[in-house]
Image (cartoon, rainbow, N blue to C red):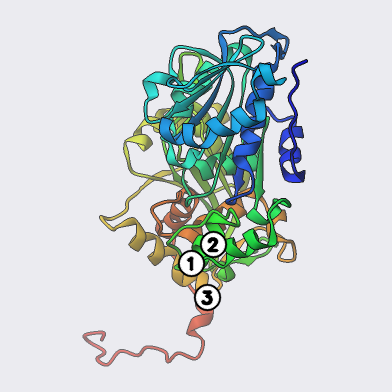
Amino acid sequence: MAELRVALHAGQVAIHNSPANNKVVAAGRRFGKTHLAAAELLIAALANEHNGHPLTEGNEVYYITPTFAQGKRAMWPKLKQMGRFASEGGVIAKVHENDGIFTLINGRRISVKGADDPDSLRGVGLHYVVLDEYADMKPQVWDEIIQPALMDVGGNAMFIGTPKGKNHFYSLFMNALDHAPGFEDWEAFSFSSMDNPTLSDIARKKLYNNPNYSTELRQQELEASFITRGGGALKEEWWQFSQNEPGDGYFVVVVDLAGFRTQEAGKPKMRTDETAISVVKITKRGWWVKEIIHGQWDTRETALKIILAARGCQASRIGIEKTSLMHAVLPYLEDVMRQYSQWFNIEPLSHGNQRKEERVLWSLQGRLERGRIILNSDPNVDYFDRPLWIRRLIEQANDFPSTLTKDDLIDSLSYTDQMGSTIFADDLVGADEWQPLDQDAGY
């Protein structure tokens, strides 16, 4: 009698038992990612139905790594060991060594694939996919090939890997963690190497005492931390918090457009960047940031969100970075304003031929260091209890000016500098009153 026996430790069990359709797993070296992937592949390939859909031999299961050779090296022996041949009481009927294919006793197949050959991934209907070391693949592999191929039977995917800076793997992880729009049925997991209880003490010491690991590399490779090699210009400890709206000043709405969501072949196509709409009150003491609305929307929805943000705070002005995107959204803004019979002055904002790093630091660094930027949040709550927009803003600020990370929220906030000048009256206390030296000339 054929049977599949799989032993998983507690962390692997937590991932396996999650009801989420898609799972993103960031884990340190030696956590057991390959072992978990092999188990999930075999379980998926042995299934006869999924979400009410009967599964046939044409509904394939893929294990994808950056290269085919890498996949064969990592997964081939693990699947053979775990699945075992039918002659040994296992579930593997036959193997196609050169093609990297296992055929199981129910006729369904597990194929090892390389993301470096995208054409080899096309043309099949998929039921389940594991993308291993997704950080080393082009995001188009998922967006344009694998995700559409899973739609026929509502198939599932698992992304696993060790973090390598803040790239598309990081974006996917954060979207799954926050259950962002479009990611409601996703779940994110993070485990360090030490979360594998089967590691011996010798193996643990060897991992953590590796002389080739810097502090950053140890955080990344063993603790599964998403880190970059930049940052430090906008320090986390400089941010101030208060839910008390200042009594003086005026609101402005500042928009950094990052493109618009479009519809392609019945499926939303999302951009990587987000549009960010900063709602800021400019006061004598600095800026009180009520909120930053961010996301990926089509042109009409973007215009609606901008006008609703301005209506919600009775903003005096709306500023938008002067690009072709601004011209694209202007007609929709006029339609929405006409709909609400409320008109706002739309002002084009310019980067003034400055590099982004210089412009952002000029606008934010000094104000932050002197406590002139206050975020709308309870100062006594834990970081993870703060609103999502604040966590994303601080996260982007921590990494700025690294080119590996997004800066949409930081960029939007920095443009507030062009929407009004803050007069720090208290800074002038004690200053000598200016007197003209010559009554006729006036100086």
The x and y percentages for residue 46 are 68, 17
Q: Few, some or many C-alpha atoms within 10 Å of disc 3 (few <14, some 14-19, many ≥20)? A: few
Q: Which residue is mark 3?
A: 370
Question: What residue appears at the point 66 percent right and 50 percent down from the top-left corner?
Answer: 191
Marking on residue 214: 1
Disc 2 vs disc 1: Cβ atoms closer than 8 Å?
Answer: yes
Q: How far, Cα to Cα, is label 2 from label 1?
A: 6 Å
The three-letter amino acid code for the residue at tag 3 is Arg
Label ID, residue 218: 2
CA distance separating discs 2 and 3: 34 Å
Q: Is residue 172 left or right of residue 70?
A: right
Comparing 140 with 378, the one in front is: 140
Describe the element under mark 2 as helix, strand or loop. Answer: helix
In the drawing, does residue 214 fall left or right of residue 29?
Answer: left
- Coordinates of residue 164 in the picture (x, y in percent): 48, 50
Q: Nearest the camera: 424 or 137?
A: 137
Residue nearest the observer in this picture, 281 or 430: 281
Residue 328 falls in which quadrant of the image?
top left
Q: Amino acid at mark 2?
A: Arg
Q: Quadrant of the C terminus?
A: bottom left
Q: Secondary structure at mark 1?
A: loop
Q: Is residue 41 left or right of residue 344?
A: right
Query: Circle 3 — which element?
Result: loop
